[in-house]
Image (cartoon, rainbow, N blue to C red):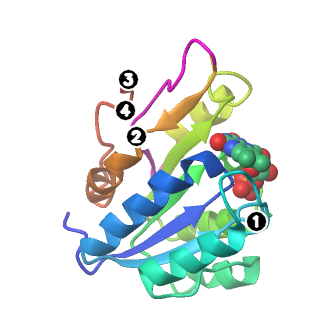
Amino acid sequence: MDLKGKKVGIAVTGSFCTFDKIFKELKNLVNTGADVYTIFSGSSQRITSRFGEPEEFLREAEEITGKKPILTIEGAEPIGPKAYLDVLVIFPCTGNTAAKLANGITDTPVLMAAKAHLRNNKPLVISISTNDALGMNMKNIGLLLNSKNIYFIPFGQDNPEKKNNSLIAHTDKLIPTLELALEGKQIQPIIETF
Ligand SMILES: Cc1cc2nc3c(=O)[nH]c(=O)nc-3n(C[C@H](O)[C@H](O)[C@H](O)COP(=O)(O)O)c2cc1C
């Protein structure tokens, strides 16, 4: 399904090393004609790291989308009753957020957005990015893979020798994953090597 005119939520969590790729894809997404809203987890809007300053990321998100990012749980809550998003992507999704989502915890703006959106029976897409994906978080990813209305951007092991349990999504597959998720389909193959 064409993304032109679709309302797409991009929910950002604290996998800072992927932010470069995330912002590149955010621009590509806006170029499709999608109407894009960003939501930031508390960590992603607070932590300064070697990958940059949170204020810069927030400014960049506003510049690209033309809208102020959603930064609070109360700001994300209307996604439920107003049902204004066609599709929501957790982009990138940390191990922390995947674990909480799989277990019904709603204590960040991103998790509030996910819960509110799922209540409307609309597609939620996960872009996994965590060092413990094949370890402590495998059970949570398994739960999410088997959950109604949840889809995954294809993922693979980014560094099997040095980071045995790490899985990262192929962020360049954002647009085709969304197009199919809007039709209720999971893009395949879901596991792709780097
Ligand atoms: C520099 C840096 C990079 C990080 N990268 C990742 C990552 O790629 N994946 C991940 O799951 N957590 C990563 N974390 C840890 C998360 O930011 C941390 O678990 C945080 O609580 C996530 O909160 P959130 O899921 O609400 O955004 C990183 C932390 C820092 C400081």
Looking at the image, tell me whether mark 1 or mark 2 is earlier in sequence order. Answer: 1
- The residue drawn where x is 71% and y is 51% is 50
Query: Which residue position holds label 3?
Result: 193
> What x and y, as percent, mark residue 85?
44, 76
Give the CA separation, mark 3 to mark 4.
10 Å
Res 95 quadrant in image: top right
Q: Nearer the viewer, mark 3 or mark 4?
A: 3
Query: Which residue position holds label 4?
Result: 190
Query: Which residue position holds label 1?
Result: 108
Q: Which residues are magenta?
A: 146-162
Q: Nearer the viewer, mark 3 or mark 1?
A: 3
**Amino acid type shown at disc 3:** Thr
Looking at the image, tell me whether mark 3 or mark 1 is earlier in sequence order. Answer: 1
Query: Which residue position holds label 2?
Result: 170
Q: Residue 15's mark?
A: none
Give the CA separation, mark 3 to mark 1.
31 Å
Looking at the image, tell me whether mark 4 or mark 2 is earlier in sequence order. Answer: 2
Give neighbour class at mark 2: few <14, some 14-19, many 20+ (Cα, 10 Å): many
Callout 3: helix, strand or loop? loop
> What x and y, as percent, mark residue 74?
74, 83
Give the CA separation, mark 4 to mark 2.
10 Å
Residue ranking furthest to the top: 161
Residue ranking furthest to the left: 2
Give the CA separation, mark 1 to mark 4.
27 Å
Res 189 quadrant in image: top left
For residue 119, above or below residue 101: below
Q: Nearer the viewer, residue 150 or 194?
A: 194
Mark 3 and ligand 1: say if the CB distance to the nearest ligand atom is below 8 Å. no
